Amino acid sequence: MKRPMQIAVLVFTVGATGGLLASGGEKEGSKILTQASNAKWQAECASCHMAYQPGLLPERSWRKLMAGLDKHFGENASLDPATAEEITRFLAANSADRSGNRRSARIAASIPAAAVPLRISETAYFRRKHDEIASDIWRRAKVGSPANCQACHQAAEKGDYSERNVKIPR
Ligand code: HEC
Ligand code: HEC
């Protein structure tokens, strides 16, 4: 009976510390996506758009996306099998449902179990967070598409999507 008690105390302590840090601005920090990197992913997945952090989609989405690179949103983004396999392993290991990051966990939780979205911008989490953005803003020349995260999130490439680093271009 001693163990569960100790665990309860530990959980409480961590929770309380999180609360304290929140007032000092550290809570935002904990929302920054896990910074995992892989050289092949950087080389192959950041040439047409930013390298979307693995923690933005669940494992099943990455596997499906990586299995269809020859028909990737109207582009052929095919890779040799060894490279594709390494990137798939990297994305899966750090995916929204496996990374342990708080924001990633929320993204994963917003997707129904049977759904396998290929776009971050189609998840309920994304829609909810962007529901105040008028449709004409998405069409602005400097934005172009909801997939263009770094048009508005100035620290997107660091996995930082916090409010203080958002600036919608004119
Ligand atoms: C040849 C160019 C090209 C390459 C290389 C490429 N992509 Fe893409 N990707 C695109 C285009 C085009 C879109 C659609 C962008 C839009 O809707 O504005 C896209 C969209 C995406 C999206 C959906 C974004 C969203 O939420 O709407 C993901 C996720 C993605 N790519 C992942 C990857 C990964 C992982 C790799 C590396 C294996 C990769 N891409 C390599 C062209 C590319
Ligand atoms: C047209 C500009 C724009 C684009 C493009 C955009 N966002 Fe956002 N995003 C915003 C705004 C504005 C907010 C709301 C800021 C706030 O109030 O926290 C937001 C909020 C968010 C949040 C929640 C922030 C928080 O602390 O609650 C996340 C996560 C996020 N965006 C991720 C993304 C990702 C990933 C992409 C690309 C796939 C993207 N955004 C594309 C403007 C944009």
Image (tube, rainbow, N blue to C red):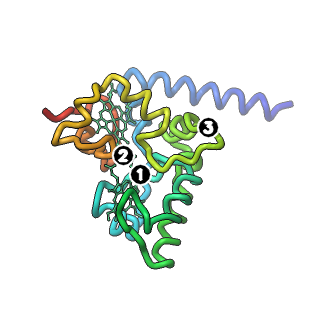
Can you tell me which quadrant of the image ligand 2 is in? top left
- Which mark is drawn over residue 97? none
Q: State the image quarter where residue 25 is shown.
A: top left
- Total labels drawn: 3
Q: Earlier in the sequence, mark 2 or mark 1?
A: 1
- Which mark is drawn over residue 112? 3
Circle 3 SS class: loop
Q: Residues within 10 Å of mark 3 (few under 14, many from 20)?
A: few
Q: Position of residue 151 (x, y in %)?
A: 23, 42
Circle 2 SS class: loop
- The residue where tag 2 is placed is 159
Q: Earlier in the sequence, mark 2 or mark 3?
A: 3
**In the drawing, does residue 162 fall left or right of residue 57?**
left
Are dots 2 and 1 in contact, CB under 8 Å?
yes
| Quadrant occupied by the C terminus | top left
Q: Position of residue 30 (x, y in %)?
A: 44, 36
Q: Residues within 10 Å of mark 1 (few under 14, many from 20)?
A: many
Q: Position of residue 71 (x, y in %)?
A: 43, 64
Distance CA(mark 2)–CA(mark 3): 24 Å
| Quadrant occupied by the N terminus | top right
Q: Residues within 10 Å of mark 2 (few under 14, many from 20)?
A: many
Q: Position of residue 168 (x, y in %)?
A: 20, 32
Q: Nearer the viewer, residue 19 or 3?
A: 19
| Disc 1: residue Cβ within 8 A of ligand 2's nearest atom | yes
Residue under the image location 57 percent in, 26 percent down: 15
- The residue where tag 1 is placed is 53
On screen, 59 above or below 2?
Answer: below
On screen, 104 above or below 21?
Answer: below
Distance CA(mark 2)–CA(mark 1): 7 Å
Amino acid type at image mark 2 = Gly
